[in-house]
Image (tube, coloured by chain):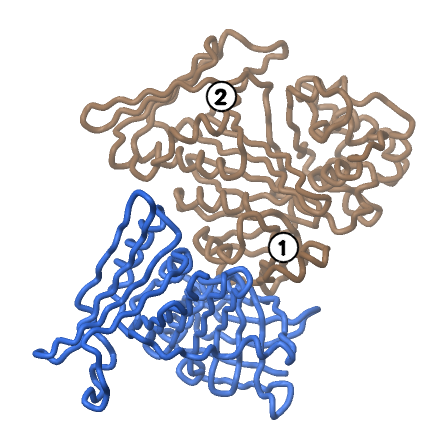
Chain colours: A brown, B blue
């Protein structure tokens, strides 16, 4: 159960987070914990074979952000000890925070509390002139979600004042795919053209070069170009204007997700965006999660209550239920062979099979070749970073530590 | 075929941007005519727009610090390019704090107008922005479609009232009917020796008839020597047009023009002749058949 209170200016930041997320996703998950409240979103969107605007992310408001914060374990917990998560429709919650800019002036206090026995969140605004507005928003219970991405392990890390980046992003419209190209000399943001001739002849190609001196931190370990949908980036930029904290961008090679991050003492926001892979054939390799060498698990998992219902292999299957890691991947011989191919060295074979336990079922064993199978594989490769033979060296080292990580995983 | 031009002055850039915005509001596709002295924006919605045409002209030396062009041959030293007007206005909009703006005709897989801007960002370091606007080069055999429309001999020529007021009136009238009658009267007041003008806009349906009278509008021929001409004490002209064409024109007006004239030829055309400092815009609305 959650009970927290905020002042007018604090609820403005909270409302801005919701507004930023509304541009990206139609649903929110609210996860109140002892350390603070996390608002998460997940978006799986395949627009076409060549582009995707899938993203996930969260904004964590730590308990010290609020004027007062109280969280207590509710009586209902599911069988493995995790607390229930609230799933909210954006269209129910966004209108409540629509006039965010006037909150500072008009709202003296805001209280939010949940009652899980009634599946409701109550948001109360205590405004000037003694006006009190109460909103009751119903939520759906949902299985716990978590977003984990090891951003420190990315080769390229940039940090920039959001205002400067927002100026550059004005060139591109929200639904466009944008390519971010870096070299140690500069950063280039440019429109990503589709492959079809129609795309080329009708649309304007725009490009902006930004020098490294505009960044607070500019570390480019790998000259690369990554392509993603700029909607989420714009959403994050809107939120960051409310916080006055520089935004950092972490990325590697195409196909590996790109992370946008804002960290400050009171809150933390991370948006993870899918990036396009260069070569379509990569999608045919069985996917493995792009894992960090830190010995820590860095993967992305989503529990999806629908995954169980669907049974066979739709896109959300690429994600596992956190609660039931053991039941995941039935061992199938194609899986073993292909995993070995991909991950290379035979001595790691055994370790890999253990890994597979953690890996989402269909990502590895997707033998079904339905009409959508290409697009699904492409999607999962975009998100999880398809591993091709070129990248074996890159990942071989990390895999050694994996064997240990996987055992400690299942607590 | 070559074209290169550069703008370095902020005021010129703003003015050019405003012109481009206005063109973008008037029609989706526009033709850019480039000649050694002038730049024209030509819009001919002959098929879609029911015959409305626009001719916008500016002297290149009033805007560009550098301007070089070369047509396909010395005799035909003109270039006609067709592009989506909004693409140009959006590219210019992003160049608001530019140090310099350069235009160049390029061929990157297909003909483009490359706009490259050196921007001053908030952190006061330079950024380079490039836009490649795709376009079509209009072949010489089609050039005759893009000639300057002949200015008709107006029966009545009258200064327009404040465009913002005109726009709000026309917008409301559109809700009643699409068929607008534009009716202008000039009355010579012998005693005061001036020509007083009245512009009337009338909408009529079975149930209602609404007329808006704009009075005390002047007339440009006041300055000319009246004595030499036979003047009727009252001159009138009336034409029926589609109100949406007039409204579309008014919606695109962001700034007050330096001079705005309305010339009417009864039963034929409403010719709007505007001047924005040094840029002239002519808009022809044909009469409804």
Residue A130: x percent and y percent?
20, 23
Disc 2: host chain: A
Of pointers 1 and 2, the one earlier in the residue sequence: 2
Tell which of A267 and B182 is nearer to you. Answer: B182
Disc 1: host chain: A
Q: Which residue is mark 1?
A: A179
**Viewer can see residue A22:** yes
Residue B28: x percent and y percent?
52, 61
Crowding at label 2, few (<14), some or many (≥20) Cα neighbours within 10 Å?
some
**Viewer can see residue A216:** no
Tell which of A291 and A87 is nearer to you. Answer: A87
Vertical relation: A400 (above or below) B90? above
Vertical relation: A88 (above or below) B120? above
The secondary element bearing badge 2 is classed as strand
Vertical relation: A6 (above or below) A165? above
Q: Is residue A347 left or right of residue B166?
A: right
Vertical relation: A62 (above or below) B64? above
Question: Whole-Å distance between the Cαs marked 1 and 2?
Answer: 37 Å
Whether the residues at callouts 1 and 2 have beta carbons within 8 Å, the answer is: no
Residue B236: x percent and y percent?
26, 70
Q: Name which quarter of the figure residue A363 lies in.
A: top right
Return the mark for residue A72.
none
Q: Nearer the viewer, mark 1 or mark 2?
A: 1
Tell which of B142 and A54 is nearer to you. Answer: B142
**Residue at horizontal 32%, vertical 66%?**
B238
Residue B169: x percent and y percent?
28, 54
Return the mark for residue A33.
2
**Residue at horizontal 58%, vertical 70%?**
B82
């Amino acid at each position: 159960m959650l009970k927290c209170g905020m002042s007018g200016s604090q609820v403005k930041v909270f409302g801005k987070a919701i507004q930023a997320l509304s541009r990206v996703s139609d649903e929110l998950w609210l996860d109140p914990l002892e350390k603070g409240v996390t608002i998460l979103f997940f978006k799986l969107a395949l627009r076409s074979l060549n582009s995707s605007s899938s993203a996930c992310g969260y904004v964590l408001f730590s308990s010290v952000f609020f004027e007062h914060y109280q969280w207590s374990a509710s009586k209902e917990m599911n069988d493995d000890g995790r607390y229930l998560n609230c799933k909210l429709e954006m269209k129910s919650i966004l209108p409540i925070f629509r006039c965010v800019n006037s909150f500072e002036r008009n709202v003296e206090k805001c209280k939010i509390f949940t009652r899980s026995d009634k599946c409701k969140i109550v948001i109360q605004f205590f405004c000037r002139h003694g006006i009190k507005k109460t909103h009751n928003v119903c939520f759906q219970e949902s299985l716990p979600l978590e977003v984990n991405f090891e951003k420190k392990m990315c080769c390229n890390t940039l940090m920039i004042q959001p205002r400067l980046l927002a100026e550059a992003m004005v060139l591109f419209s929200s639904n466009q795919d944008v390519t971010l190209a870096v070299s140690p000399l500069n950063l280039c943001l440019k429109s990503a053209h589709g492959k079809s001739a129609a795309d080329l002849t009708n649309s304007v190609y725009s490009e902006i070069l930004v020098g490294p001196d505009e960044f607070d931190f500019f570390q480019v370990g790998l000259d690369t170009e990554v392509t993603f949908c700029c909607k989420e980036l714009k959403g994050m930029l809107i939120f960051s204007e409310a916080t006055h904290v520089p935004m950092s961008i972490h990325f590697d090679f195409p196909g590996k997700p790109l992370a946008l991050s804002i960290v400050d003492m009171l809150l933390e926001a991370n948006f993870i965006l899918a990036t396009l892979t260069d070569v379509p054939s990569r999608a045919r390799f069985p996917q493995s999660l792009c894992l960090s060498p830190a010995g820590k698990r860095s993967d992305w998992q989503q529990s999806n209550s629908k995954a169980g219902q669907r049974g066979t292999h739709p896109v959300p299957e690429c994600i596992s239920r956190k609660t039931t890691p053991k039941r995941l991947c039935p061992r199938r011989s194609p899986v073993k062979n292909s995993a070995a191919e991909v991950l290379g060295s035979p001595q790691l074979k055994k370790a890999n099979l253990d890994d597979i336990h953690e890996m989402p079922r269909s990502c590895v064993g997707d033998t079904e070749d339905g009409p959508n199978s290409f697009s699904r594989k492409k999607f999962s490769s975009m998100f999880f970073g398809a591993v091709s033979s070129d990248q074996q060296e890159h990942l071989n080292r990390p895999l050694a530590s994996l064997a240990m990580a996987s055992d400690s995983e299942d607590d | 075929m070559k074209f290169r031009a550069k703008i370095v002055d902020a005021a010129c850039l703003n003015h050019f941007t405003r012109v481009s915005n206005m063109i973008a509001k008037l029609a989706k596709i526009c033709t850019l005519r480039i000649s050694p002295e002038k730049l024209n924006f030509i819009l001919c919605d002959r098929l879609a727009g029911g015959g409305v045409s626009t001719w916008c002209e500016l002297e290149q030396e009033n805007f560009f610090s550098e301007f070089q062009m070369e047509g396909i041959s010395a005799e035909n030293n003109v270039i006609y390019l067709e592009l989506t007007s909004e693409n140009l206005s959006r590219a210019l909009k992003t160049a608001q704090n530019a140090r310099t703006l350069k235009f160049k005709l390029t061929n990157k897989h297909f003909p483009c107008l490359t706009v490259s801007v050196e921007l001053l960002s908030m952190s006061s370091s330079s950024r380079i922005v490039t836009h490649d606007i795709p376009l079509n080069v209009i072949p010489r055999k089609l050039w005759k479609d893009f000639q300057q429309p002949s200015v008709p001999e107006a029966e009545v020529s009258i200064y327009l009232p404040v465009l913002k007021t005109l726009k709000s009136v026309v917008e409301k009238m559109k809700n009643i009917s699409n068929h607008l009658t534009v009716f202008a009267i000039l009355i010579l007041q012998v005693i005061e020796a001036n020509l007083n003008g009245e512009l009337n806009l009338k909408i009529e349906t079975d149930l209602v008839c609404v007329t808006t009278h704009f009075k005390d509008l002047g007339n440009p021929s006041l300055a000319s020597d009246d004595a030499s001409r036979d003047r009727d004490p009252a001159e009138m002209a009336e034409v029926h047009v589609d109100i949406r064409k007039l409204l579309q024109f008014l919606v695109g007006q962001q700034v007050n023009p330096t001079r705005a004239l309305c010339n009417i030829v009864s039963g034929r055309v409403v010719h709007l002749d505007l001047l924005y400092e040094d840029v002239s815009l002519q808009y022809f609305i044909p009469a409804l058949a």
